[in-house]
Image (spheres, grey):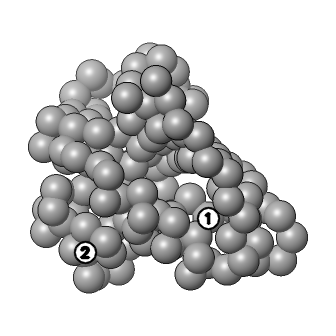
Amino acid sequence: MTRSRTTVTASAAETAALGAEAAVALRAGDVVVLHGEVGAGKTTFVRGAARALGVDRPVTSPTFTIGRRYEEARPPLAHLDLHRLASLDEEEPELLADYLNAEHVAFVEWPEAAGDELEPRLRVRLEHAGGDRRTVALEWAR
């Protein structure tokens, strides 16, 4: 069973608040995939979720490091950005093991590189809607 919701946010703060709202329903082992163009608000959404889960340090895009973990979050949070990878076919299988596991809620930006390997609990699609506005579609599984 899936639930869907589409919202238009008027600012980065509203996009982050939507991330915070979604975070309260997430549990360790859940995967959230985020789709959207560069600058659509994917990291802003993750930042809001991280704040709601107890992260008080800066949350930035892990584009150049593949991933970051925030062990202080409850549950612990992993934030991945697969933008630099064309696919996972040429990568070591354990590349994502520290992030995609039963202990962390994992937020994955640019999940297309993972192909069908991810089983997301939540799909988030962010689109520019003019100015600071974003159309955010949430699709929950399970």
Residue 17: image location, x then y, percent: 49, 73
Q: What element carries label 1?
A: loop
Q: Viewer-proximal residue, 103 or 94?
A: 103
Left-right relation of 29 to 122: left
Q: Which residue is drawn at 27% across and 22% down?
A: 93
Left-right relation of 142 to 70: right
Q: Which residue is drawn at 39% across and 35% down?
A: 121
Q: Viewer-proximal residue, 136 or 2?
A: 2
Crowding at label 2, few (<14), some or many (≥20) Cα neighbours within 10 Å? some
| Residue 133 in sight from this viewpoint | yes
- Marked residue nearer the N-terminal end (1 or 2): 1
Q: Which residue is drawn at 22% across and 38% down?
A: 29
Q: What residue type is labelled 2?
A: Val
Left-right relation of 9 to 42: right
Give me the C-alpha separation between circle 1 and circle 2. 18 Å
Residue 83: image location, x then y, percent: 55, 44
Left-right relation of 36 to 112: right
Residue 131: image location, x then y, percent: 83, 77
Q: How many marks?
A: 2
The quarter holding residue 48 reads bottom left
Q: Residue at x 79, y 61 (%)?
A: 128
For label 1, the residue is 41
Q: Which amino acid does label 1 sit on?
A: Gly
Quadrant location of the C terminus in the rendered image? top left
Q: Is mark 2 on a helix, strand or loop?
A: loop
For label 2, the residue is 55
